[in-house]
Amino acid sequence: MIQSDCKITSKKRLTDNCFLFTFTNSAIAQKAKPGQFVMVNPVKSKSHQGRIANVVLELHRTSNGMNVDYGIAANKCSPPIHCGVSGANRVLKGLYLTNRIFLRRPFSICVAKNKTFSIFFKVVGPGTDILSQKKEGDVLNIIGPLGCGYFLSSLPSPLSPIFVAGGTGIASLFFLAKRVTNHKPRATIFIGAKTKKEIFFKKELEKNGCKVIASTDDGSYGHKGYISDVFSRYLSTIHYPLFTAVYACGPRPMLKKIAETSEKYKLKCYVSLEEKMACGVGACMGCVVKTRISTDMKTQINTADFEYKRVCKDGPVFDADEIIWENEYTNQ
Amino acid sequence: MSIRISKLQLKNPVLVASGTFGYGLEFKDLLDLDKLGAIVTKTITLNPRSGNPQPRTFELSYGMINSIGLQNVGLEKFINEKLPEIRKITKTPIIVSVGGNTKNEFSKILETLNSEKVDAVELNLSCPNVTGKKIISQNDKETYKFVSALRKKTNLTLIVKLSPNVTDITKIAKSAEDAGSDAISLINSFPAAFYRLPITDYQLPVFGGLSGPCIKHIALRMVYQVSQVVKIPIIGMGGIMNTGDALEFFKAGAKAIAVGYANFINPKTPLEIIEGLKPHSNQYLFNCRRKSV
């Protein structure tokens, strides 16, 4: 684990609110394994002070003597950017964001090369919002790589792995898929997204020899509906054993369904979980998930015996058998 | 820059606050633990505790609310696994934060720790996240009874961490001093509540402890007030983010400070503060409080 100032060498806007940032830092990039993540401080930037000054200046220019209660106005416009704020409101929001303190935000490592690594994220709140406003050349303080990655040891086998990605969950699985490109037979990857625009990395994955099966909530691409249902239908038509294991990353309700389906078809399933984090290194115990204690995990019926494990340190990838799925909520 | 709190000799007055630094092991790759004044561990209870269900954290513009519920490995595992490991990597004094439901639990832990390689104990009489339990340090008589009973159980330096959620903090602090405490940690997090977003009709609030820069000036006020009535050292904490914040606490009467929330934003904060304090050591650390122990 390394803490370092990393320069944004490339910023790509893939859709209105999805971004791919590439940072230069060979130490983090070389250590990174698929499934691991980095903690990014979204405001500590060398140009940070200058940015505040600019915002204040612009506020003077645009507000034009307007009497605005700063606190109230800032609160009103604190939701993410898609609410279409403009002019003074927009500036106030910028001021509000640059002046507040942010905990670091965890992001899966999406690509890691020799000297650079990338993160892929969607703007869902003020933290990702302010991060998305960073420019190429800005410097952010990053801690990583963190957590344990996907368990790759089971991969070299005559059978192929299945990847299931929901939404931005594609980030860590894209990295995993790239690392197992020389794998024969090819991997099958299921991608679920809201609309066609949000199916990412499909071409690269196909170039790498993956078979891509996609679904969208609105039916604008691939199957209409949830990817977990597509996954389950697909397995029911396949004469197994064809697959080594299932690797899934996405929203909690999706992971739960994938885990259940995998169990039904006797497939080993690994899930990469997402949770709100404060420290990211295992100190604060904020990001825990309920897990079974028993060594023979499936026989443990009494869910009163459980242990909270840290998503950041003990995960984020867990054996799906280990997880006690509860009434799952989504962050979105 | 070295200071002394009873038997505890510290090379500098910058500590890390309990609960934000794990058992000291988690941050070992990110900063040189040897440079810290002392490490205060996550609160240890007699038996392992699984802690509260999610959601456990809630972020604010200037701080956070946590509802961890004292999840920890328990005394036995701490002594057998965590303590030897941390002792292997650093010589920095270890202050063990101790929690429990009853006086009996506290005494058992203290008696066990007497023969272990720890440097001090901090009694967590103020965790806001344990349901169905009164916060002991909210009552001066209770505090006195509790601390004086536990004082007899330990020969280590005894620090008492107090709750800020009281009508008169000076009364409680005074009873802790009278009961034989060697130092006072001020302050623990404030009892607070949040709703998991998005808010739904049937949702109940989640109770937790409020910490971060938003409580700094309340902490500062309490450190000042308490410094006027007690002679024992005060370890000030609550939203310290940088050297400037630390200096304010020294000015208000703290003999040492602890960094909590800021460890999450930047784990190097304590070291940056230590560096930042160096030019000020004469001005603040030694002159602001002439009342020495």
Image (cartoon, grey):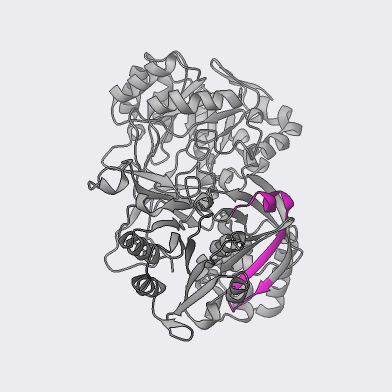
Report the residue that reaches farthest toward the bottom: A220
Locate residue B128 relative to residue B118 in the image: left or right: left
The quadrant of the picture occupied by the N terminus of chain B is top right
Please give the range of residues in magenta. Answer: A12-33
Between A212 and B175, which is closer to the camera in this rendering?
A212
Q: Is residue B124 above or below residue B91?
A: below
Image label count: 0
The quadrant of the picture occupied by the C terminus of chain B is top right
x, y percent for residue A70 = 57, 69
x, y percent for residue B233 = 54, 24
Residue B136 lies in quadrant:
top left
Between A278 and B175, which is closer to the camera in this rendering?
A278
Residue A117 can be seen, yes or no: yes
Between B203 and B257, which is closer to the camera in this rendering?
B203
Residue A248 lies in quadrant:
bottom left
Q: Is residue B208 magenta?
A: no
Q: Is residue A286 above or below residue B71?
A: below
Query: Which residue is located at x 37 percent, y 13 percent?
Result: B152
Q: Is residue A229 above or below residue A270?
A: below
x, y percent for residue A212 = 52, 74
Locate residue A263 relative to residue A41 in the image: left or right: left
x, y percent for residue A119 = 62, 62
Q: Is residue B258 above or below residue A230?
A: above
Q: Is residue A14 magenta?
A: yes
Residue B224 can be seen, yes or no: no
Between B9 and A308, which is closer to the camera in this rendering?
A308
Query: Which residue is located at x 66 percent, y 48 percent?
Result: A31
